Amino acid sequence: MASFSSLGVGLGGSVDVNALIKASVDAVKLQITRPNGLNYQAKLTDAKISTFGQLKSLTATLQTAAGKLSSVTGWNAVKASSSDDKSVSVSAIGGTVETTFSVDVQRLARAQVSTSDALPTGLPAGAGTLKLEIGSWSGGSFTAGAGAPVDIAVTASDTLADIAGKINGAGVGVTATLLTDASGERLMLRSKTTGEAAGFQLSVTDDDGDDWDGAGLSRLAAGLSSDPGASAAADAKVVINGSYEVFSATNTFENAVSGVTFKAEKLTSSPVDLTVAKDNSTVKKNIEDFVVAYNAVNQALNELTKYDSNTKQGGLMQGDSAVVGLQNSLRNVVQSLSSSTDVYKSLSDIGLGNIQGGDLSIDNTKLDAALKNPDALKAMFIGADGLSTTQDGVAEKIKAATSSLLDSKGFFASKDTQLKEALKRNTQEINRINDRASSAEALLTARYVALDTQMSKLNALNAYVAQQVTTWNKRSD
């Protein structure tokens, strides 16, 4: 509110006009500022919006946890193990059939490595053209692959270092490195990838007209154009169950056994046994995660709806029928029965019971016993039909209930819209009252200014009249 330091002069200087105006404006704003007023209601609504957002997040976590138990793939977890994982490591995808097989690693995948004869250090190699081809070596002969060969032009001033740079910049599947020893410099080429098909051959076209005279650029042909022998690129080779040879360009075998991926880490002196078995630990972890997720929602709802008789204070949502209804619906669906005709029909049958406050507890002895009967346990969560497309299992019902709550037109979306509309109306009302207060302030200020001005004039007139009376009285004397 504006301050008028001179206001009140005409009123004798003893009237606190600013205080009078402020009191009037404050009275207009009382609906905003009083306890439980519009400001308080706005903060309360903001808190509820935030709280429902947190509840939505907790419910989404519960939905995810229930989804793992209602999904067929969630029950297909397997565990792959190796009798010697330092020699052969293994993994398997969910649903892989339980099996055991042996693997004997007879060869690891290699990249080809070829090195040229030594040339004088730092001197030009000679002019001409190098041709690099990717392919495979067999029986001393080279078979080019499907890719086009790459030609690399070499000038008369190029050294081996220059040639290595040109090869590395050519984008072919070979890296070039310069080696220096007592004999001079050598060009070492290595395949960028392993596998028989990743071999290479370098051919030389020497500008001196003779590609094999040991002079000029043709000096690179020795060691780089011929069969690399033991340094040739090769596929990894393993023998499965002592009978079946399998090859891989890398040391990883993805399709040799359906659903299983294993990697040859080193050569073996005896077969390594690889085993794929059901992984009950994953199922148990999914059940434990579900309990944690449900308890988190339940505890949050308990805190929001509680009433503390000692402090006489209620939770933020205490008495909110919608929130109480939400808690009851979740508790009811958790206690629902499966359509399973097997031994387990409810969560309590497998050791998941309710304790004080509505939380779920886990009887590990009972749950571990249920895990030994995986088909019956699965039927309890997914239903008698064993399909995740229906909603006749306990986990399916919980997922369906939480999905409905989280739907774009469900409980949380509806509450969010409702609260935001209330906050919008609250803001509009605050703005309306503030506008009215501003108008009242402006009107009162204008009236007091006018009154002060008029009083100043009257005071001046009064002073003049008094002066004239005094003068007349003196003259009459």
Image (cartoon, rainbow, N blue to C red):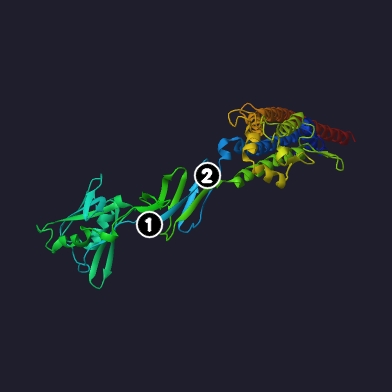
Distance Cα–Cα, label 1 vs label 2? 26 Å
Which amino acid type is marked by label 1? Gln
Residue 206 as seen in the image, left or right of residue 41:
left
Residue 85 sits above or below residue 430 on the image: below
Residue 136 as seen in the image, left or right of residue 434:
left
Q: Quadrant of the C terminus?
A: top right
Mark 2: few/some/many CA within 10 Å (<14, 14-19, 20+): few
Q: Is residue 2 visible?
A: no
Under circle 2, the secondary element is loop
Q: Name, please, the residue furthest toward the front.
A: 243
Between residue 119 and residue 72, name the one nearer to us: 72
Between residue 29 and residue 156, name the one nearer to us: 156
Q: Is residue 252 visible?
A: yes
Q: Position of residue 437 (x, y in %)?
A: 74, 30
Instruction: Residue 201: name its quadrant.
Output: bottom left
Residue 138 sits above or below residue 356 on the image: below
- Earlier in the chain: of badge 1 and badge 2, it is 2
How many circles with numbers are drawn on the protein? 2
Q: Position of residue 164 (x, y in %)?
A: 26, 59
Disc 1 designates what residue?
106
Instruction: Residue 280: name its quadrant.
Output: top right
Which residue is at a point 39% across and 50% down the rendered structure image? 243
Between residue 404 and residue 476, name the one nearer to us: 404
**Residue 98 - label:** 2
Mark 1: few/some/many CA within 10 Å (<14, 14-19, 20+): some
Which amino acid type is marked by label 2? Glu
